[in-house]
Amino acid sequence: MKKIPLLILLVCPLLIWGQESDTLKTSVLEEVVITGQFEPQSARKSVYQIKTIPLERIAARGAVRLQDVLNTELNIRFSQDLALGGSNLSMQGLAGQNVKVLIDGVPMVGRQGTTNEININQLNVNAIERIEIIEGPMSVVYGADALAGVINIITKKTVDGKLEFQAKVHEETVGSEYGWDKGIHNESIGLGYAKNSWRTRADISRNYFGGWQGNAAGRDKQWHPKTQYLASGLLGYNKQKTDVYYRADYLFEDIYNPGVFVNFEALDQRYYTNRLMQQVQGAYEFSQRLQFNGVLSLTNYNRETQTTTVDESTNKSSLALGPGLQDVTKFNGVTWRSTFQYKWNEKLSLQPGIDFNYETGSGGRIKTGTQTMGDYAVFLSAEWKVNAWLQVRPGLRSVYNSVYAAPPVIPSINTKIKLNENQDLRLSYGRGFRAPSLRELYFDFFDASHSIEGNENLESELSHSVNASYNWKVVDTDKFKYTAVVGSFYNYVENMIGYGQKPGNNLITTYLNIDRYKTKGFTWSNTLKGNVWEMNAGYALTARFNPYSESFDDLEEFQWSPEVTTSASYRIPRAGLKFSLYHKFTGVTPFFELATVDGEQVVRLAEQAAFHWADFTLQKDFGKTISLTAGARNLFDVVSINTTAAATGVHTGGGARPVGYGRSYFLSVSYSLTK
């Protein structure tokens, strides 16, 4: 692993220079958030602890996928599934099925349905306005799979009276590989117009990833080539008390997995994904006290697996006929969500709502044809400003699931205590319920290298979550701002669903209920802002539960893993330049596993190695319309990290886990016009 110069060597001289010029002063606006709110408000006034990633930061990352933006965020981790071309995230030590991913408040549907892990890299980064992240329980407002938190992706909306046009070309190496059919090539166009209460917008993007050879032999590639086409369109009307719009998002993805020739033949696989997400959102203001918000969404998701046999001598391909080699899996999801906001008086507001979700799944890898599940809920939340320093938001949610019995009531309470003008304390508790997804219940996949099936005897997950955060604006002047946030969390999940070996048949992988699972942790974030510079530093310590500790008294109950994040940016307004550096250290992650040693099953301690990830970018503006972004990704040249686990999942084995494809370099040219 190669070392790079410390951040301070680059930044300190620039910070000193920047302090000398008062003419470069800029004002910092308060962040306005909408996720989980009764109405848009500043993040500081919200009862939730909300982290916002604005458009400016997304652009500074030179991102072509959402993982490029989030991979150095505190308390968020990613794992790569190279076999299927996906990236799964975790938050607060909990896997992705406990993190709700939303697009403009609407839940996403992915390869595993709606209530399971979502591949966030199947989104058009160039169409994102900002990202709002709430860590902690949001089960009452957004459903039980929002135990660890919510990631709400807010898309771009056209400003009234404006014509907007954006175009971008992005070129990037994949490690040292680059060429016409190698590297990363991204092109995108966005066009919006708003006038006389009407607004419309369209965004189109193409992502080409040429794959990466790595340690793969012959025709095979360690990271598989991928092509994505993403398109979205919006048509809306906003006048006086009415705001309504229709939005459609389309994804086509082609992942190519070339095989190695064996006995003059190779098996090539392609994974085709088609997803169309349509939504109608509307808001109406009956009076200053009563408002309505509603959304109706329909998602059609198809994933096709196509396997062909390639003849080495003729290079001709034909469809392979083996079991499990051809498949089309379909998920269709319908969401209807509506809320009323009623302001009883200056101190008390009420929010009753309904949240209906219906999903169907079918295909060769879904048992017995088409399966369905409905999740229907009513909820009531209130926001009570008890006095000048105390704000309380209790909530109740009642759920009916068509397959599983839910608790009569799911409660939550969020509290914000204003200690003084510069210090706030937030406390939250949430109860959760998550029924197994259609995939977890009915998945059925057997071929030469897979033996995976769902488990119709699974029980629902029930959970408790407690979070606390302390916010302190240590310094707040015209020239310098310093803010510190200290947080802690505790999650307790009964009947946690995970992978395991089928009882009575160790050759089959299935889904099992773990008796219980817990995570707890501590976070500390710091932000320093000057007129032309910003620095961030954070530390997190997360403990993951050892389920074997309940059977073996000599084993520790929790295993701890640290994270450290740092970032810095510096602007030279007169030159139109901005330098940015992002870094994250992910510490050793220990865990206990069940392994076979000398023919006997034993519980042993394994660990995943620590690693560093860092990106550097340089932005240069040419006037108000053209911007150039150049940089390097994965400065530490990390490819994989060692793990001492004997077996680590369905598509990964012991020995090493993929992280990246080496140090890469990129260049983006953007054109933006607003009239």
Image (tube, rainbow, N blue to C red):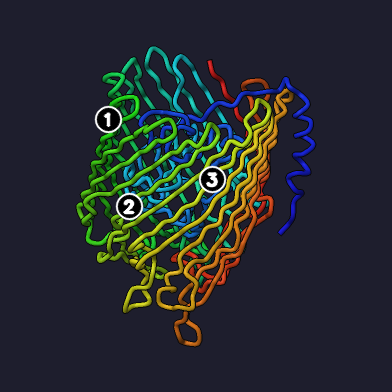
Numbered marks: total: 3
Q: Earlier in the sequence, mark 3 or mark 1?
A: 3
Where is residue 34, by image quadrant?
Answer: top left
Taking the image as drawn, is residue 315 in sight? no
Classed neighbour count for the residue bearing mark 3: other residues with Cα under 10 Å, few (<14), some (14–19), many (≥20): some
Pointer 1 with pointer 2, Cβ within 8 A: no
The residue closer to the viewer here, 25 or 102, is 25
Residue 432's disc number: 2
Separation of disc 1 and disc 2 at Cα?
A: 23 Å
Amino acid type, callout 2: Gly
Residue 470 x %, y %: 52, 43
Marks 3 and 1, how far apart at CA: 33 Å
Give the amino acid type for the residue marked by disc 1 in the picture.
Phe
CA distance for labels 3 and 2: 25 Å
259, 669: nearer the viewer: 669
- Viewer-nearest of labels 3 and 1? 1
> Residue 340: which disc?
1
Q: Are marks 3 and 1 in contact (CB under 8 Å)?
A: no
SS state under label 1: strand
Relative to 521, 412 lies left or right? left
